[in-house]
Every structure is written in C-alpha cells, then in structure tokens.
Amino acid sequence: MGATEQRHLSRALVVDDDQVLRLLEQETLSQFGFEVCQAADGETALALLVELPPDLVLLDVDMPGIDGFEVCRCIRQRWDANDVPVIMVTGMDDLNSINQAYESGASDFIAKPIHWPILGYRARYVLRSAQAAQQLRELEERQSAIVRAMPDIIFLANRAGVVLDYKEGYGTTAFVPPVRLLGSRLSEVLPADVGRLIVHALRRSLATGDLQEAVCRLMQNDGVHHYEVRIAPSGTDKAVIVVRDITSQRINEERIRRLAYFDTLTGIPNRQSFLERLDRELLRARGEKRQVALLFVDLDGFKQINDTLGHAAGDYLLQAVAERLKEKLRGSDFVARPLREESGLHVARLGGDEFAVVLPDLDSTQVVTRIAERMQSLISQPFQIGQHEVTVSSSIGVALFPDDGDDSASLLKHADSAMYQAKARGRNNWQRHVRTPDGETAPEFDLASEFGHALQRDELRLVYQPQVLADDGTITGVEALLRWQHPQHGLISPNDFLPVAEQSGLIVAIGEWVIRHACRQLKTWLRDGVMVPRVAVNVSARQLWMRDFAACVTAIIAETGIEPNQLELEISERLLTNPDAGRVDGLERLQQLGVRLSVDDFGSGYSSLSHVKRWPTGVLKIDQSLVHGLPHHRRDAGIATAIIALARSLGLEVVAEGVETVAQADFLHRANCGKLQGYLFSRPLPAEDVERLLRQGRIALPARRSEAGCRQRGKTVG
C-alpha cells in the first residue's frame, strides 16, 4: 500500500488492558482497512485522543484506573458521537451494563467473547453511520444557513390554509405578526381578497403537484407593499409558501418605465410613449373606421426666452406649458359622447419646445378646430417666471387619419409640415396639412418635416477634415463634420438643416450622436493601427445647456474606450458673451478629465479675448471669414495677426480655418499660427478616404514663396 493510499485509511484507537486482545483487535480491524493505534489504559487513551482524534474508538469497559464508561464520558464531553464514534467492548452482557454503555455515549457495544469476523463489519458499519450522520448534519446546517439568509418569508400550510410553521425573512418585516399566523388560517389573518387568492393557489398546487405563483398587494405602515408568492406542494396535504417583498423591484421597474416613457423635465409622456400610443390608436381606428387627429405644437419665440432669461427659465416655461395642457385640455370638454379612458386625449412632449396631442374617435373635424383654438388660448395666457411675466404663442400643425396618412410616421411628418406652414404664415395660428395637386407635401416645408426622421432613418453621415502643422504639414487631428444624405434629395448642406435642428431641439440628440460616432470611429482607427492624435467635434449651445452634458460626454468616452485627451470639443464664440456658471463648471470638469476645449469661429464679431479667459479653453480657431481676406485685405490681416499674438501670449494654441490658398497659408505661417485647416490641404472626406491621409501622417505643403519673391511680386503688381 502506497503512502498516498495509506493517508486515506480510517484511524481506529483500540483501548484494552489485555495485550492479546489489543493485538487481535488490531489485526482484525487492519484487515477491514483501518489504521490502528493502541492504548493499554484510559489515561493513555485520553492523551492519544487529545493529540490526534481517531475516526473510531474500540473501548474496553473493565480496565484498571479509569474504566471504559468514564473514558467514554470524557470523549463525549469533547466530541460528538458522529465525530468520534465509540464501540464499547464488555464482558458483561447484562442489560444494566448495556444501558450504562449507551448512557455514557457509546455508539454501539460488543460483548466478549468477541466474534472476530463480525467485529470488522460492526466497526465499518458504525463508522459509516457516523460519517453519514455527520454529512447529513453539515448539509442541514448549510441549508439552515441559506434559509436564514434568505429575505423570503416561508410558511408551511395544510390544504385548509392553516399555518403549521413559519420562518421570517432576513431583513424583512412580517406583514402579519408570527403569533397571529401559527395555527391560524391565512384567510383569517389576511385581507379577504389576498387570503382567497393564496388559498386558491395552494389548493391548485396540491391538486396538480405543480408550482403556483401569485402577486398581491398589502398595506403596511409605510405604504403599499407588493409581494410575490410561490407555492410548492410538500407531500399530499401540505405546501410550502414562499413570500418575497418585491416592492423595491416594482419601484425600480416603475422608475425605469417612467424614464423610458415619460419626459424627465415635464413629467408627461415622451416621444417614444407618444408614438406607441399613436400606433395603438391607429390600429383600433382602422378596425372601427374612425378618424384620429394629430396636433403638432411648437412654441413661438422659445429660443428668445432662453437667450434673455436663461435656460432655467426656459425649462420652467416648458413645465408650465405641459402642466396647463395636461390639466386643462380634456377630450371630454370637446366631445359630446363619453370617451373611453384608454382612448382619451393624449398629450406628450416630443423634444425641445415641441408638444403633440392625439385625439382618437373623432366624429367631426370641428372638434379639432376647438381643440387647436383651446390649446392656443391656454398657451397664450401669461406665465409668471420669477419676477417676469412671460407671454408666448404657439404654431400648430394638424394631420388627420386616414386622410393625411395611414401610419404614425406619415401622420407625424405631415403634422410637422403643417406646423411649419403655420409658422410661415406669421406664427400664432394653426394649419391643417395641405397637399399639392400631385398629392405630395409642399416643397417649402419638406426640409423641416423630413429632418425630424433623419436620425431614425440613418441618413446622417460624418466626414472628417484634417488639421495640420503649419511648419511641415504633419496631421495633428481631424474635425468631424455632419452631413445629411437624403435618399431623394441627395446631400443637403448643414447651413440648411442645422438651423432646423437648433429650432426644433433635435440638435441635442444629434449632437450626442455626432460625439459618439466620432469617438467610435477614432477607436476603430486606433485599433487598426492608424495614428489619430485627436478628433474635434462641434458642440451646440443647446447641448451645452443640458444639465447632464458633462456626464453624457464622460459616459461616451468610457463607452468607446478612447482617452479623454483624444477628444476636442469646439464651442461657438458667441457662447463666450453669456457665460453660465453651470456650463463653465461642466466644461471645467471635462477639461480636468483631459478633454480639450476650443473656441470655434473666433473673430466673427461676437467676443473678445477677455471673454476667453473666463472659459476653460486651450485652443482658438480663427474664423474663416478673416482667413478669406488674407493676405491682401489689410483689416483682416491686422485682426488675424493680433489674435494670434494675443492668444500665444495667453498660452493658447491657434488654428486657422478655411485655408484655401498658398498665400493664406504662407501669411499665417509667418504670423506664427501653429495649425491650419482648409481645402488647401483636404476637403472633408469620408472615414475610409481620410484614413489614407492619416496613414501617411502628413500632407505635403505647397512650396512657399520667399519673402523677397513676395516683395518683388508685390512691387510688380503695384
């Protein structure tokens, strides 16, 4: 037998004052796989036990000194019968001795003379029984610990619903005191409806043998609690009832639902909720052959409120408008017959200062007229914002199902188009959707209505324009620029669609899309071994005014896995003239994270370098309107040179935009402008095309003219 196998033998301690019997017992037990040690008396046995407890003790009763009964009692004071089982060996076969052996803690006994083959089997059986009992005890202890740690309340009840046993959940307050539960019927201690529900599920579980589930609500001292009840049969006439308090889960589910379907600012349904509701109403209207009206509402002059009173005032105005529409605009006020609750007038905020109303079950289009007029009347009433009394008007577009569209997308598109018709006709009015003779929407309103769907239809694209060192053309980064690729009208200029996005409030969602996709593209380039020091993205005023703008940018950086210093945010110069402490704090947090901040379009007439000092920016981008006049336009040259010199004195980098000619690049280089960007080096390109330039690492600059040559040509021209 090898050493490894020897270590797995069970150890037996033989205690007997008769040496011959000890040897015979040792030989017998060895044949049954035991490793045996011996002790000639009780004192020696106890000493060996303390040193290394055996798996089994074979103990003679009649010994000099401490007898076997006393030794057994000493063993039991320290070890359980399952830990160290004891077989008493006695020459006395009277019942008194047998009882005394068991009372001392013996696991079994053998009478002398010993039947030697039986001894080995008895020893093996006693040891296996002890080991099985120990394993069972350990299993029960683990199960008990698990049950104690569970937050569930557990009942054992019979078919009649009488509680036979009860365990309170860890950290869970019982909805009924335990003293009232034990021995009571659930139907007697619980509210009638809850009691009936659980007893019915209990009987169904016993009848089918299957797990049954139920959810119930109970009023507690701190409010309504929700409970999940699971019932499993335990035998033929009893069942285990496991009750878990899922109140926190329900609260979280409701919170998630509200985040998904309700506007966080106003508390009314959001765009997603609105579209789902509209789809349901259209489906029902098709079956019942009824009309549905969609009203698209936009506040006139909302941007002016933001610009003059600040965005906190703008947010308050949106909340007040939503509250008025929700409380004072009811379908029952306009429809003679009663409306079903689930199909009543539905108000939602689509984004920015845009709201929408859906009115199903129309009998007459006159109802739409009254609702539109009522909405305009409600919105036009003054709002008190702090010390200011503010009055706004609204432009409303109306589209009807099925006349103006057979699905939610076309209906919303045509209502949006009609709203822009209302604005074009002087604002503060409402218009029904009007089609041209060929059945299409009037062209002048296509842009605004179509752009609302550009993001969902994946029509937006990013192109990238390199920025280079004025010294040698080394590419120092790229600027991400947004383009709209319309499926019918082709590439649409940002000058056309960005004002629409700004006015509608879509610029926030689109701006986030641009940052995320630019960062993803940067990560893709880096993963493919393309060196891109930095990607720059323009940030709109509305984005910056969002309270969670800094958190949103931080989340995108973490999501895409780029380094913060690889992202540059470009802020329009006009924002510098009206610094908001909250916005500055957000930008400072991003700068501390490592994000670079630059001022775009500098020198276009809105600001001065004194404003720049109040913002955490590190880069100035000279507006292309100044670059366009270089080098011959004296005023532009003077302003550009002054900006470069002052910016460098403040420790700011300078980038000149819109560089298109060698002469412009030459002038800017001599004026110590460090970086250039423009068509002279590259037009904005799709990612796959600009990647070829990035792999080269630099763009060859056109040969510069010498200063002497410049002067000579200047004389010739003069």
Image (cartoon, rainbow, N blue to C red):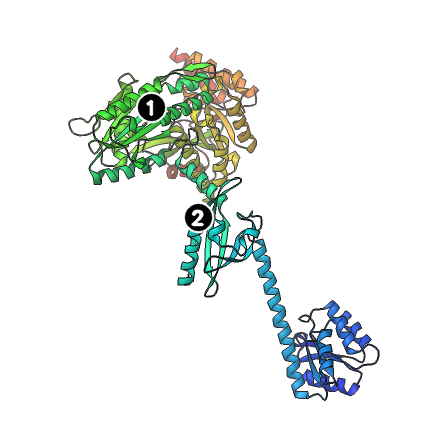
Where residue 462 appears, x then y in whole percent?
38, 34
Q: Is residue 64 left or right of residue 217?
A: right
Please tell me how crowded label 2 is: few (under 14), some (14-19), or many (20+) other residues with Cα within 10 Å.
few
Tag shown at residue 56: none
Res 695 seen here: no
Please tell me how crowded label 1 is: few (under 14), some (14-19), or many (20+) other residues with Cα within 10 Å.
many
Q: Residue at x 69, y 81 (%)?
A: 109
Q: Which residue is mark 1?
A: 298
Figure check: 172 above or below 92: above
Tag shown at residue 192: 2
Where residue 486 appears, x then y in whole percent?
29, 33
The three-letter code of the residue at mark 2 reads: Ala
Q: Residue at x 55, y 33 (%)?
A: 593
The three-letter code of the residue at mark 1 reads: Asp
- Which element is circle 2 on? helix
Figure check: 507 above or below 691: above
Q: Quadrant of the N terminus?
A: bottom right
Q: Nearer the viewer, residue 409 or 396?
A: 396
